[in-house]
Image (cartoon, helix red, strand yellow):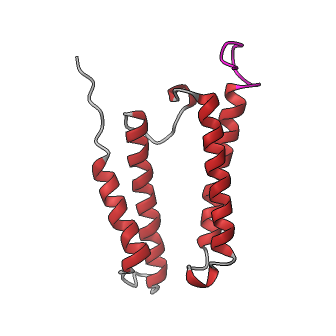
């Protein structure tokens, strides 16, 4: 029996189109809240959601949303990369909220900070779960 891997390209393409609209094109109806900029933010967040699903399917070759640590090939090494990505996103959120603030929508820095904190929390959890809090001594490397 052969394994079938979920297709990630549809999610990646839809996410790219939505992000392109949110960042460059700026086409958005006013919506029931009578605010095109709010609708544009919703479109951008939906695009990020599609990108996340595409990344998950590409990385883990399965459907789902939660990257369980037992699915990681190298949790100890990957946790450092995840934490570095979280810290990088936090730095980007500072840039978006301070020097780049006049060029971006107001909540951009706040949203990026939320994403950066969640990424950092995931990295710290993976470090602890594969290190000092590991179930068995051979898991802690």
Q: Position of residue 66 (x, y in %)?
A: 51, 39
Query: Horizontal placement of 78 versus 38: left or right?
Result: right
Q: Is residue 74 above or below residue 117?
A: above
Q: For residue 95, what is the image quadrant?
A: bottom right
Taking the spot 31% from the left edge, 59% from the top edge, the residue there is 14
Taking the spot 68% from the left edge, 37% from the top edge, the residue there is 125
Q: Position of residue 87 (x, y in %)?
A: 68, 53
Q: Position of residue 102 (x, y in %)?
A: 61, 85
- Quadrant where the C terminus sits is top right
Residue 139 lies within the magenta run: yes
Q: Is residue 124 above or below residue 99?
A: above
Which range is magenta? Answer: 131-141
Front-most of residues 83 and 57: 83
Front-most of residues 59 and 3: 59
Residue 47 lies within the magenta run: no
Taking the spot 69% from the left edge, 68% from the top edge, the residue there is 94
Query: Horizontal placement of 132 versus 4: left or right?
Result: right
- Quadrant where the N terminus sits is top left
Taking the spot 56% from the left edge, 79% from the top edge, the residue there is 104
Query: Horizontal placement of 132 versus 118: left or right?
Result: right
């Amino acid at each position: 029996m052969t394994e079938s891997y979920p297709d990630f390209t549809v999610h990646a393409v839809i996410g790219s189109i939505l992000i392109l609209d949110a960042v460059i094109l700026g086409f958005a109806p006013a919506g029931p809240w009578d605010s095109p900029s709010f609708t544009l933010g919703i479109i951008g967040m939906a695009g990020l959601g599609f990108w996340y699903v595409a990344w998950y399917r590409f990385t883990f070759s399965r459907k789902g949303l939660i990257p369980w640590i037992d699915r990681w090939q190298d949790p100890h090494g990957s946790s450092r990369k995840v934490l570095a990505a979280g810290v990088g996103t936090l730095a980007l959120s500072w840039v978006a909220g301070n020097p780049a603030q006049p060029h971006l929508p107001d909540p951009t820095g706040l949203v990026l900070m939320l994403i950066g904190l969640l990424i950092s929390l995931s990295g710290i959890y993976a470090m602890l779960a594969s290190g000092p809090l590991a179930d068995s001594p051979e898991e802690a490397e």
